[in-house]
């Protein structure tokens, strides 16, 4: 009898625990409406990151390196002449590799070609100079261009504006949903931000004309960043 | 026996409690969560280089002997450049035979041997990179697998980046809360992730110019990024 009583007490304790748990969850009884608000920041790029370099080839490794050095120096000079600061220029790759020569049967002939590659990644902050800079780099010996990508050095202010827009958007959506169901929008219950996503935009009427000055024709266009806020409102 | 039942019931209860406490936390829980990134730019003070010597010959002995001679010369050149032996490590040594075939695809019995000896170098004076590469190549190095700039002690920059991320996250949380008409409580959870210095060239650190008669290189600057997520309760 006493034992049964003890067993019943434990089961009771468990039941109390379980009900306490569902009450602590809070959300279960709370009426809410969840929406995702979107805000967009459109920015004119103010920096452009360029990766380009020099590749040379010779049967003598020393000759291949020497040719490469001469041309790479010229390229660095051209980049600096365009006003790029040394701190914005980084050697992103330097490599020497060999490739064996083969006869028609696929046997190595014993001769080797050496490939030397010197690659720079740099940031140009004076965008209208891009076309001339690319032209000058290519004329002074660059023979590979891997990347030209526009960016915004500090998009934070524009993103904050986009966040306020996203909150307004979320509020409008939530009000519409609440009204439709005859409820009233209460205070914000939960708010989460998804990271801003840059969206590349190619059509840019205002920046289309002569964006890059002379040399290689280029155009910076517009960069679009999207902010998304996930907001849960309480309903009354 | 009965005791065992009680223990298992208690265990079950605690499991239920644990499951219950971990369950709310996403949309069930009232709160505001922001994630912000902070960046610090700094000049590299170390550059890692992988370079070596590759030789080939029909006799394995002569391929190895040739390689040994050139590698010793490369090591001597590196020492001349002021590199300590503790900053030079043999990272790869291999001997690989390659069969020769006649026009019917049958092995002729002749073999070409390839010998590779690669060292990993840590150079603590990035401004000497061009000279070091030039000296190694002049001494016989004929393969360079790349150069990587880094920072030997990023901890201070990481702390600065973390602080920036926290400041940005707090400012943003207040901006969002006030715009949404909510009031923030004290931070509930803070998560931080700080990365290692990586290549970025959008900084303003000072850099040395490479001297004339060497491989032209430029260290630029590195970026240390921190990401912080803060969750606040809403009042």
Image (cartoon, coloured by chain):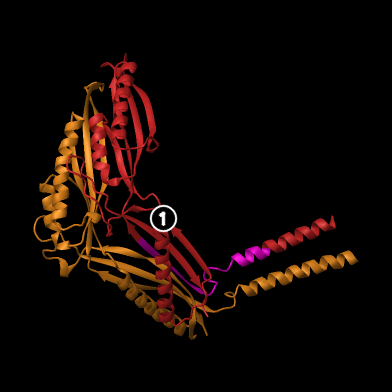
What hue represents chain B?
A: red
Chain under label 1? B
Q: Residue furthest toward the left? A: A214
Q: Is residue A178 above or below residue A211?
A: below
Is residue A185 positioned above or below B225 on the image? below
Residue at far right of view:
A1
Q: B211 left or right of A236?
A: left
Residue B17 lies in magenta, yes or no?
A: yes
Q: Residue at x 33, y 24 (%)?
A: B115
Give me the residue at 15% from left, 48% from top: A75
Q: Is residue A141 visible?
A: yes
Q: Position of residue B120 (x, y in %)?
A: 36, 37
The answer to which of B204 and A179 lies nearer the viewer is B204
Hue of chain A?
A: orange
* Nearer-the-camera pick, A59 or A21: A59
Label 1 belongs to which residue? B195
Q: Quadrant of the N terminus of chain B?
A: bottom right
Picture coordinates of residue A18 (x, y %)?
69, 69
Q: Residue at the spot x=43%, y=83% of the render?
A: A175
Task: Write down the region rendered in magenta.
Answer: B16-39
Between B201 and B31, the one nearer to me in the picture: B201
Q: Position of residue A205 (x, y in %)?
A: 16, 69
- Taking B14 as reference, is A172 above or below it? below
């Amino acid at each position: 009898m006493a034992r049964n009583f003890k067993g019943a007490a434990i089961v009771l304790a468990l039941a109390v625990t379980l009900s306490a748990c569902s009450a602590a969850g809070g959300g279960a009884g709370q009426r809410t409406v969840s929406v995702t608000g979107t805000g967009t920041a459109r920015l004119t790029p103010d920096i452009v990151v360029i990766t380009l370099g020099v590749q040379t080839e010779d049967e003598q490794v020393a000759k291949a390196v020497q040719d490469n050095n001469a041309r790479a120096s010229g390229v660095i000079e051209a980049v600096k002449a365009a006003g790029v600061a040394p701190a914005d220029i980084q050697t992103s790759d330097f490599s020497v590799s060999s490739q064996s020569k083969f006869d028609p049967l696929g046997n190595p002939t014993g001769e080797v070609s050496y490939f030397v590659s010197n690659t720079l990644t740099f940031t140009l902050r004076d965008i209208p100079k891009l076309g001339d800079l690319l032209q000058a780099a290519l004329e002074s010996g660059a023979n590979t261009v891997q990347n030209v990508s526009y960016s915004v050095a500090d998009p934070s202010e524009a993103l904050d504006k986009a966040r306020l827009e996203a909150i307004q958007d979320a509020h409008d959506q939530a009000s519409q949903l609440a009204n439709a169901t005859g409820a009233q929008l209460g205070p914000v219950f939960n708010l989460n931000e998804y990271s801003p996503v840059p969206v590349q935009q190619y059509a840019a009427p205002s920046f289309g004309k002569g964006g890059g000055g002379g040399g290689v024709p280029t155009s910076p266009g517009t960069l679009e960043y999207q902010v998304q806020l996930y907001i849960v409102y309480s309903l009354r | 026996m009965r005791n065992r039942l009680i223990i298992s019931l208690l265990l079950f209860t605690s499991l239920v409690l644990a499951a219950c406490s971990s369950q709310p936390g996403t949309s069930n829980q009232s709160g505001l969560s922001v994630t912000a990134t902070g960046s610090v730019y700094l000049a590299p003070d170390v550059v890692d280089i992988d370079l070596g010597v590759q030789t080939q010959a029909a006799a394995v002995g002569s391929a190895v002997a040739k390689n040994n001679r050139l590698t010793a010369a490369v090591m001597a050149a590196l020492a001349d450049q002021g590199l300590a032996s503790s900053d030079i490590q043999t990272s790869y040594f291999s001997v690989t035979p390659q069969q020769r075939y006649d026009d019917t695809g049958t092995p002729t019995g002749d073999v070409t041997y390839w010998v590779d000896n690669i060292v990993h170098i840590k150079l603590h004076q990035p401004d000497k990179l061009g000279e070091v590469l030039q000296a190694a190549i002049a001494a016989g190095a004929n393969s360079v697998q790349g150069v990587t700039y880094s920072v030997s002690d990023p901890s201070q920059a990481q702390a600065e980046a973390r602080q920036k991320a926290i400041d940005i996250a707090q400012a943003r949380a207040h901006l969002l809360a006030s715009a949404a008409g909510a009031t923030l409580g004290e931070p509930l959870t803070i998560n931080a992730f700080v990365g290692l210095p990586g290549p970025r060239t959008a900084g303003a650190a000072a850099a040395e110019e490479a001297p004339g008669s060497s491989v032209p290189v430029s260290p630029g600057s590195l970026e240390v990024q921190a990401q912080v997520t803060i969750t606040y309760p809403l009042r």
